[in-house]
Image (cartoon, rainbow, N blue to C red):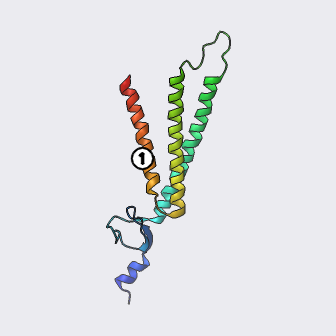
Amino acid sequence: MTTPADISEANAVRKTCPKCGYIRETSELNCGKCGRVLQSVSGIRTRGVLSVLLGVALLAFMGWLSLWVYNAITEPTQPGSTPRFTGGPEEIAFIVFGFGLMILIGLAGTIGGLWQIVFGKRNKWIVYLVIVLGLVFIGTGLFLTMSN
């Protein structure tokens, strides 16, 4: 005779708690330690693959854009033509800062995704790093918007 415990053990899936990091095979929805909703390891790994793909795409795009801007800034102008870049050192510093920040966000997202794929759980410090970098990016944009 099949009991409810047998059925729940048959439906057990490897899950992790995003708060306390506990990993176990279970059919329960909430963590037994802290009560937070459990996430399936396979779902976390799937999101890790997506994070790696988006991070690599951002790195590739920012790398291409950096080379394009570098060529636009350093390319010698033809006699009689208008320079392609007319900014000064402050503008160049801002471009480098903004591009560097976006590259760091892409790199952190890629590393975070790889962590999720390998370990089946999120790394809280990488999540915090991406949040802080995003806030710095948004704060820089707000500062520049309000300063004009």
Provide residue 144's location: percent of width, then percent of height: 40, 28
Q: Which residue lies furthest to the left in this view?
A: 35
Q: Determine the residue positioned at 61% across, 36% down.
A: 64
Q: Determine the residue positioned at 33% across, 64% down.
A: 36
On screen, residue 44 versus residue 57, left or right, reads: left
Q: In this view, does 72 lie above or below 101?
A: above
User: As rendered, which of 52 and 20 lies closer to the eye?
Assistant: 20
Judge the density around disc 1: few (<14), some (14-19), many (≥20) Cα neighbours within 10 Å.
few
Provide residue 61's location: percent of width, then percent of height: 57, 39
User: Which three-letter amino acid code belongs to the residue tagged 1?
Assistant: Ile
In the rendered image, which quarter contains the N terminus?
bottom left
Asked which secondary structure carries label 1, the reply is helix
Q: Residue furthest bottom?
A: 1
Provide residue 51's location: percent of width, then percent of height: 51, 51
Q: Is residue 119 above or below residue 24?
A: above
Q: Quadrant of residue 65?
A: top right
Q: Determine the residue positioned at 51% across, 33% down.
A: 97
On screen, residue 76 versus residue 109, left or right, reads: right
Q: Is residue 49 above or below residue 20?
A: above
Provide residue 138's location: percent of width, then percent of height: 40, 37
Q: Determine the residue positioned at 50% across, 49% down.
A: 109
On screen, residue 105 versus residue 1, left or right, reads: right
Q: Report the label total.
A: 1
Residue pointed to by mark 1: 131
In the rendered image, which quarter contains the C terminus?
top left
